[in-house]
Image (cartoon, rainbow, N blue to C red):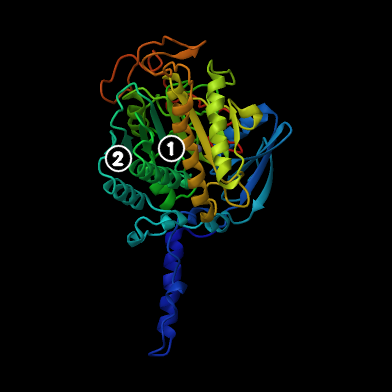
Amino acid sequence: MTAPRGVRLALACAALLARASTARPGAALPPAEEHARAPDPYDMFDNSPILLLKACGQGEQELLMGEIEDHPCTLIDQVGKEGACSVTAVICPKPLHFEHAVAEVFKDDAGAYLRGAGLPRAWDRRSQRSDDFYAQWRSYDDILTRLQDVVDAAPGVAVLESLEPATHEGRVIKAVRIRDPAWAPGAPRIVVNSLLHAREWIASMVGTYLAEYCVDKKRSDPSWMAGMELVIVPVVNPDGLVYSQTSNAMWRKNRAVNAGSSCRGVDLNRNWPKDWNGGESTSTNQCSETYVGPSWASEPETQALGAVLLEAPVNLHLDIHSYGEMILGPWSYTNADHPDKATIDAIGTAMQSAIQSVNGKSYLYGTGDAGGALYLASGVAPDLSTHLGAYGYTIELPPANAWGSAGFQPATSEILPACTEIFEAVKAMVEWFRVQDPTPAPPPCLQHQCRHRRQGRCVARRAPTTLPGTRDAASESWEGKTPRHASGSGKSPSRTRAGGTSAVEL
Ligand SMILES: [Zn+2]
């Protein structure tokens, strides 16, 4: 196993000093690149193997998840299924024995393997409105600058807003709001967000592109989105993105400090009230990648995006992740059909066709576990928006699978095609409002007005509620009950449920 980064740097510098001291006077110093490579977020995986763990049967898979959490390993993903067996990839400091799986070394050096994905490159702002921006990974600061430039160039069309509260590390989550002059609360409204999960860098690029190109389209064609509002939040987890791009490329959660634990972070796509801490792909272990948090909506990022979802009725919500190339309609926590499944499917397949029209790429569409293609997940954002009356979708961006491109950070050549494809999907969502129900159009089922449409009529829903910690923190929760607390946050044994990893990342 290699020495820690600081030790290696010191050793490298010491070696150079020794060489310099024995060199002839006046001899040239070695080239700078011999001195030391700059630290990067792949360093911590140098010389650690990627292991493939094959576990067979639901019981063994659940036990394996707990075993992984007990080892000093980083969970990558479930990368395959073979009948009743699943194959899970992890990075461990050395080959380890697992009680509940057969382990095989896939790569000897995870750092070298993952480093192929590259690092964020500084953006040359002189190429301001060029798509060059989307040819490389970009830092959070560059994304914010880009968004500001986009909005500044479109006065009266869009605004860049700061959401509240700020993150644990004090960063402000930004939203681009495009509002047609004829819009009023209750009129059609779409919310798009990306990068709940830190390591899914491509999602931050796609979210930024959507903001840019939707602003441009509304500016050049004022009739587009007539009477509508579109809110785009490109980076919901900026603390995690920065940490992922500088320290640990495989980081998924936010950067919360968990009481009583050295493990940081809450899974921001398990922290939502709908079926929070439920039975699907969740964990109360603070070290788990799917840690649900000490209570629902405990995290400032959840509260900030939640405030956008609650401030006015939402009709369509899109939550952008990677990877898997899928569109997932509600629900995520159960395979039970939503009463409006036919409409949900129509919108989902319209997005699917729109994506395919760009480069011919065929995304899988499904609801629930998509016919077994993935796993159910409790406490996710789109299920909350759906619970509030919207139709909430998840998109899993490229690549289609983990291997050959490291999964979370695919080749940078994949960024721009994904951007253009998902832009068409968002346009299809906008178009749905225009063409739905031509005779005579009943209003869409809105969050504060009605719950479901049955036989053309909206079925009343209960009164809206608010998030704790935001605006009027109400005693009544989204779920109409007080928050439950995770058993693993104290001394009680923690619990992990299988399915937290899959061939896609929800
Ligand atoms: Zn994700």
Q: Which mark is residue 124?
A: none
Q: Residues within 10 Å of mark 2 (few under 14, many from 20)?
A: many
The x, y position of residue 48, in whole percent, is 57, 53
- Identify residue type, mark 1: Leu
Q: Residue at x 58, y 41 (%)?
A: 356
Say whether residue 357 is visible.
yes
> Is 168 on the left or on the right of 360, as rendered?
left
> Is 188 on the left or on the right of 431, as rendered?
left
Q: Residue at x 38, y 38 (%)?
A: 236
Please give the residue where the numbered disc 2 appears in the rendered image: 158
Task: Confirm or reject: label 1 Cβ below 8 Å from ligand 1.
Answer: yes
Q: Residues within 10 Å of mark 1 (few under 14, many from 20)?
A: many
Vertical position of residue 310 compared to residue 362: above or below: above
Say whether residue 261 is visible.
no
> Is 106 on the left or on the right of 148, as rendered?
right
- Identify residue type, mark 2: Ala
Q: Which mark is residue 196?
A: 1
Vertical position of residue 279 compared to residue 454: above or below: below
Q: Residue furthest right?
A: 83
The x, y position of residue 95, in whole percent, is 63, 49
First in sequence, mark 2 or 1: give its number.
Answer: 2
Q: Residue at x 46, y 37 (%)?
A: 427
Q: Identify the secondary structure beneath mark 1.
A: loop
Rendered image quadrant of residue 297: top left
Disc 2 versus disc 1: distance between alpha carbons? 23 Å
